[in-house]
Amino acid sequence: SPTASPTASPTASPTASTGGFNGDPIILGFQQQVFKFEGKDGGWYSNISNKHLQWNMQFKEFNSCPAHENMFVSALSLSFLGGNHETAQSNILIVTTPEAIEECRSDPNEVCLGEGTLHVSFDEGKTFVSKPGYYHFSTSSRIVAHNTYAACSRKWYDYEVSNNDWHSIRDGGRRTTVHQKKPLQFLKDGKSTMIDKEGCESWIDDRTRKDDLFQQRGHWSTLHIETPLVSFQVEYRRSDWFDPKCDFQSLDAWMTKVSDKMEQTDWAGILGETKYKVYDSQTGEQVKTDRSKLLRGKDDADYEVNGPFETEFSAASKQIGLTAKVVSSAIDAVENSSFSKF
């Protein structure tokens, strides 16, 4: 059953090729862009903002890590907006805590996500669940949460940038079937992108035979978030428990499916802007790594929101209405020109 808010708050206030971020935080865009977004300790930032979804992420600085490598995504929020028959309006909050909550510390037989340091709320942070399992939050939306053997943690896409393709996550507008994958099927389907495919395979076989995935303990965890309009995968990682030279907690998150209905809307936010290709005015080549050219907001503060479920940020005003249409038209024109044939 849900528990009260974790007593160790993540900060003083209250993150295939698909787009997403890793905990450093490095942003991997939908069009092969890769760039670092610095942010500030405790700040919440808009990652994707459109008429159906607000995806925010919170940064946390870990002082034991080397300078310029000490900022990680430690919490994220997902607001599914404009509730309808496909996706009811919901606010999901995923947070980490430096220490395990009391419920997970006091009972040695209790199995908790991230050994009690990863927590999910379905009511904007009023209560949290910290145990592996299925969690339905509307008729056809759910989170599947389980601890993960390190070898089975999915590779971050730094290793596979060449495969990045926005169109690979579009479902062509087809409605998903009512049938939902079983938790172990997620693991089996993703074996090719896991850190140690062979090492993971025997672990999956054991879990299948014993039917005990949700009874597995572990410091690392995986969340699969499924809705009719969009789906995500979140990997929770922590520093080496026995030798924490850089003592951190990190959330890597990326989209695994985007419906045609959502794709056809205007997108804003740090990751949202990477839906559109940007080209260098001098060379005609696509800009992939220069953050100052990729994002319309020149300062990180342009993407800052006032809390996990806030939707307003300065950069949004730079890409709405006529401006957005002009930019989209320019991008389409360039994609059809000789500059895009490289």
Image: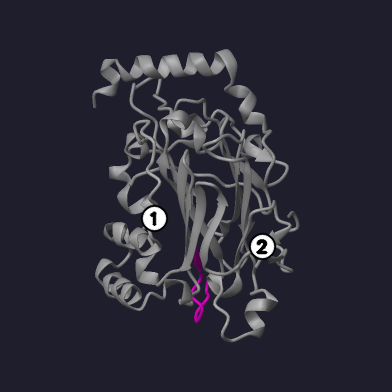
Q: Position of residue 111 (x, y in %)?
A: 54, 77
CA gap, disc 2 to disc 1? 27 Å
Does residue 24 appear anywhere in the picture?
Answer: no
The quarter of the rendered structure image containing the N terminus is bottom right
Vertical arrangement, residue 146 with respect to residue 142, above or below = below
Vertical arrangement, residue 115 with respect to residue 46, above or below = below
Question: Is 337 placed left or right of 235 in the picture?
Answer: left
- Which residue is at 38% across, 17% downward? 332
The quarter of the rendered structure image containing the C terminus is top left
Say which of 204 and 159 sits in front.
204
| Callout 2–callout 1 Cβ contact below 8 Å | no
Indicate the secondary structure of the residue bearing disc 2: strand
Image quadrant where residue 130 sits: bottom right
Overall secondary structure of the magenta section: loop
Q: Residue furthest bottom?
A: 108
Say which of 129 and 334 sits in front.
129
Q: Which mark is residue 156?
A: 1
Which mark is nearer the camera, 2 or 1?
A: 2
Figure colour scheme: one colour
Q: Position of residue 334 (x, y in %)?
A: 35, 17
- Which residue is at 60% across, 73% downward? 116
Q: Position of residue 206 (x, y in %)?
A: 32, 77
Q: Which mark is residue 128?
A: 2
Which residues, given as a range, are shown in magenta?
236-245
First-in-chain label (2 vs 1): 2
Q: Position of residue 180 (x, y in %)?
A: 40, 52
Say which of 228 and 152 sits in front.
228
* Total labels drawn: 2
Q: Is residue 147 magenta?
A: no
Q: What amino acid is at disc 2?
A: Phe
